[in-house]
């Protein structure tokens, strides 16, 4: 069947294998011994990291194994979604410490991409709250991995985009909360300097994220809206507040020509204008705060049938302001920006070989897929590398091997672990081929 990532570019025809249990995963590996494959969770990575000729879906590995309410630990299958976990634990007064922008990511996918959220400055990445996991290797052997057991394999798998093996299940640390509400404060910034200053000013808050107008120029370059969140206090663990509201479906791909610099500018000006007023603090349901785009079903269709590319970068703090400024100037001049541009502050990174975050500022941009955008992205790559930054593998669909190796200085350490546990490159994706991490696969017919 034809599959793609969330960006719908590229598309690839694949054979899908769906083992219903951990034992069946081992059987599937034996039966496809001559075929390279990659694990795929819910298909929410944006590019080609979960695309291959053969794809092993973890969708049915969605079981709960144990819940320790006293010590706030949950053991669950890799295929379960973070949204499903929240439905279980929030009424019990617990929460996931790190969440992405959608509830539909699988636990295994969150680990493979070592996702981050609106609170990396305080809570780090997803893997920083994983006690351990079970990993099925290419030879069918199952390894228990943690920071003290098979620790190099742990560091290679967290952020390793599924290239070391198949995550079967994991034990997660949970966060205690009083109820399901988030106290949300909205602050408007007039330019990039103010946006960055507000992120730093509110770094002691639990959650901080800024939408920015990536098409604004001159004195308004980098203007935005900063959203500051904290878990509401009060021991009301069973509370179910106001529901997030009805979802809005996008039943078909919109014509790509509708997304252009004029429509984007109109949206950005309108959105900024709506928030450029006195905004009272408000209490909202956690889904409304963390997953606003989930209310627009299949919102990726808004970019047209050709799809789009999401481009996420991080620049270390000393170089971040100037580097982000150069990138926004280039994007605004090209008129290729989108209505989904996000600025966040990262805290220190972790020791995983291919994890994305480092201490600095991260910027996320969406670009409609068209021929002219690839040249622009190559220009942005040069700015990122000139400021010692890196690009996020979970968003990537076109990075070169040379850029990847410059972005990730520990790639050789990762490759050494992979070659030890997967010498024949059984686990490989279109992305890993492109980045030079699975060269043996390129010689196969």
Image: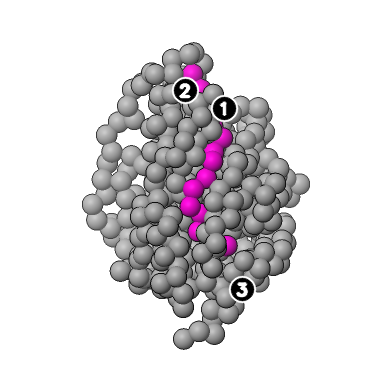
User: In the image, what residue occupies the spot 30% across and 46% down?
Assistant: 297
Q: Measure the alpha-carbon separation of dots 3 and 2.
A: 45 Å
User: In the image, what residue occupies the spot 54% across and 81% down?
Assistant: 442
Q: Measure the alpha-carbon separation of dots 1 and 3.
A: 39 Å
User: In the image, what residue occupies the spot 47% across and 23% down?
Assistant: 93
Q: Is residue 75 above or below residue 156?
A: above
What is the secondary structure assignment of the residue under circle 1?
loop
User: In the image, what residue occupies the spot 56% across and 73% down?
Assistant: 425
- Residue 50 included in the magenta stretch of the image: no
Q: Are marks 1 and 3 in contact (CB under 8 Å)?
A: no
What is the secondary structure assignment of the residue under circle 2?
loop
Residue 144 drawn at (x, y percent): 59, 51
Residue 93 tag number: 2
Q: What residue is disc 3 on?
A: 423
Q: What residue is disc 1 on?
A: 71
User: Viewed as shown, does residue 61 lie left or right of 383?
Assistant: left
Residue 398 drawn at (x, y percent): 52, 68
In magenta, the rendered stretch is 164-180
């Amino acid at each position: 069947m034809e599959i793609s990532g969330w960006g719908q570019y590229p598309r690839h025809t694949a054979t899908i294998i769906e083992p219903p249990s951990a034992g069946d995963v081992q059987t599937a590996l034996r039966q496809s011994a001559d075929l390279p494959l990659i694990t795929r969770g819910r298909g929410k990575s944006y590019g080609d990291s979960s695309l291959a000729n053969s794809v092993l879906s973890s969708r049915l590995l969605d079981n709960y194994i144990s819940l320790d309410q006293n010590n706030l630990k949950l053991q669950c299958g890799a295929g379960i979604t973070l949204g499903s976990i929240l439905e279980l634990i929030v009424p019990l007064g617990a929460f996931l410490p790190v969440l992405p922008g959608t509830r539909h990511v699988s636990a295994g996918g969150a680990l493979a991409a070592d996702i981050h959220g609106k609170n990396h400055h305080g809570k780090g990445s997803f893997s920083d709250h994983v006690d351990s996991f079970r990993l099925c290797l290419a030879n069918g052997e199952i390894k228990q991995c943690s920071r003290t057991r098979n620790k190099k394999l742990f560091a290679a798998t967290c952020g390793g985009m599924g290239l070391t093996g198949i995550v079967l299940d994991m034990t997660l640390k949970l966060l205690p909360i009083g109820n399901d509400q988030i106290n949300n404060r909205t602050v408007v910034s007039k330019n990039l300097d103010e946006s960055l200053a507000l992120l730093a000013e509110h770094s002691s808050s639990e959650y901080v994220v800024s939408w920015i107008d990536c098409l604004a120029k001159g004195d308004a370059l980098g203007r935005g809206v900063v959203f500051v969140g904290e878990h509401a206090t009060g021991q009301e663990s069973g509370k179910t507040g106001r529901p997030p509201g009805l979802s809005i479906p996008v039943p078909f791909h919109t014509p790509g020509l509708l997304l252009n610099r004029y429509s984007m500018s109109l949206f950005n000006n309108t959105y900024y204008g709506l928030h450029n007023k006195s905004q009272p603090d408000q209490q909202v349901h956690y889904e409304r705060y963390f997953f606003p785009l989930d209310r627009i079903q299949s919102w990726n269709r808004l970019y047209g049938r050709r799809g789009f590319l999401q481009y996420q970068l991080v620049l270390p703090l000393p170089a971040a302001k100037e580097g982000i400024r150069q990138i926004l100037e280039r994007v605004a001049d090209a008129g290729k920006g989108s209505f989904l541009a996000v600025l966040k502050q990262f805290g220190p990174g972790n020791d995983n070989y291919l994890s994305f975050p480092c201490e600095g500022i991260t910027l996320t941009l969406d670009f409609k897929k068209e021929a002219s955008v690839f040249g622009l992205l190559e220009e942005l790559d040069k700015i990122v590398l000139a400021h010692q930054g890196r690009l996020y593998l979970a968003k990537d669909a076109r990075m070169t091997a040379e850029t990847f190796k410059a972005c990730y200085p520990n790639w050789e350490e990762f490759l050494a672990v992979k070659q030890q546990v997967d010498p024949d490159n059984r686990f490989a994706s279109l992305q890993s081929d492109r980045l030079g991490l699975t060269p043996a696969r390129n010689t196969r017919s």
